[in-house]
Image (cartoon, rainbow, N blue to C red):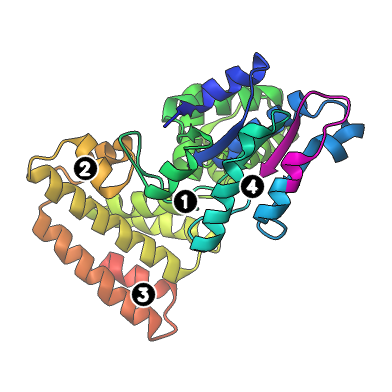
Amino acid sequence: MNIIKEADFRKEIKSDKLHGGYIFIGEEDYMKAFCLNAAKATISGDEIYDFFNYIKMSSMDFSASALLSAMAATPMMSEHKLIVIDDIDFNKLKSAQFNELCDVLSQLENYDSSILIISVSAGNINEGFLPKRPSTELSKLAEYLTVVCFESNTQAKLATWVQKHFEHNNVHADIDICSKLIEYSGKNMYSLSNETDKISYYVLFHGRNTVIESDIYNVSSITMEYGAFAFSNSIMDGNTKLALDILGDMKRNKIEPVNILGEISRVYTEMYSTKKLHNSGCSNAEIAKILKVHEYKVSLELRAVYNISTEKLENIIEKCAAADIALKLSTQGYIAIERLVCSF
């Protein structure tokens, strides 16, 4: 199996060495879109020839026969044409459709002028455990396509990217401020791009060119993951005021109570599993693989539950379940969550 990283793919674009077929997998959909645009700019040439040199298909118009026809078409005023398929959910693809696709992919080497990219959104294919144990599905596709992994960026890399995004808007933000924005609004690069723009316009509107921490909380949208994690930590720390403040933020962002409580329950359950696995002797890397989360997240959760017993976590999970039932069987809404906070 030929597996490369996103950075390697971008090097192939710059050196004009793209060839054959690729399949984009992994969590970072923003960078997949970025690389697709970069490949298009390099391959398809002048936009007036896009009709001949850039063929894009989605799940609505994709078929094995349509792909074969696209591969056989002749490019115009260019050595190559780019074929992009960017909306297939392999989890929903029927076995016969998958086999037909593979039959067409097996013929790709006969069409030197065609460069094919299948971009799979995060969660839309079973990847298995790369690189040693890929899924059967991905292994089959990799017989014909180069696998390009778009891994979620580290906190440090994202912070640097956010800082550059601010600078592009003529606004400065210290790296620790960028990290706080990521913690508050999440790691999704689409969301971070929007949040960075919103803060930039807010800062410039107020006659400043430097971002301060309060700008994040005044302008940005809180991510469910941050809210639930911070909320859960505040309860374990016995900080009722902070827990209610965070709940207030989630209210202002109009996050549904049932979603909030569901996510909080998930966080506690994950923390409980993390602690149990740690107590049984598993390393952070092993825990991350078993729970299918990032190792950095495991370290955060272990710090959060360091002084919390598994028995207390079990008790909290039981109370969350009871609050969830009360919420779903009544019109209590946020009140059910506030009562949960006060019960501790």
Distance from Cα at disc 1 to Cα at disc 3? 37 Å
Amino acid carrying mark 2 in the image:
Ile
Sequence order check: which comes first, mark 4 or mark 1? Answer: 4
Q: Tell me if 307 is positioned left or right of 205 in this view.
A: left
Specify the label residue 287 is tagged with.
2
Q: Do the residues bearing badges 1 and 2 touch, measured as CB atoms within 8 Å?
A: no
Distance from Cα at disc 4 to Cα at disc 1? 12 Å
Amino acid carrying mark 3 in the image:
Ala
Residue at 35% in and 68% down: 338
Q: Circle 3 sits in a helix, a strand or a loop, which is it?
A: helix
Specify the label residue 86 is tagged with.
4
Sequence order check: which comes first, mark 4 or mark 2? Answer: 4
- Disc 3 target residue: 336
Q: Do the residues bearing badges 4 and 1 touch, measured as CB atoms within 8 Å?
A: no
How many residues crowd mark 3 within 10 Å: few (<14), some (14–19), many (20+)?
many
Residue nearest the observer in this picture, 206 or 8: 8
Quadrant for the N terminus in the image: top left
Query: Nearer the viewer's eye, disc 3 or disc 2?
Result: 2
Sequence order check: which comes first, mark 1 or mark 2? Answer: 1
How many residues crowd mark 1 within 10 Å: few (<14), some (14–19), many (20+)?
some
- The answer to whether 334 is drawn above or below residue 12 in the figure is below
Residue at 39% in and 74% down: 335
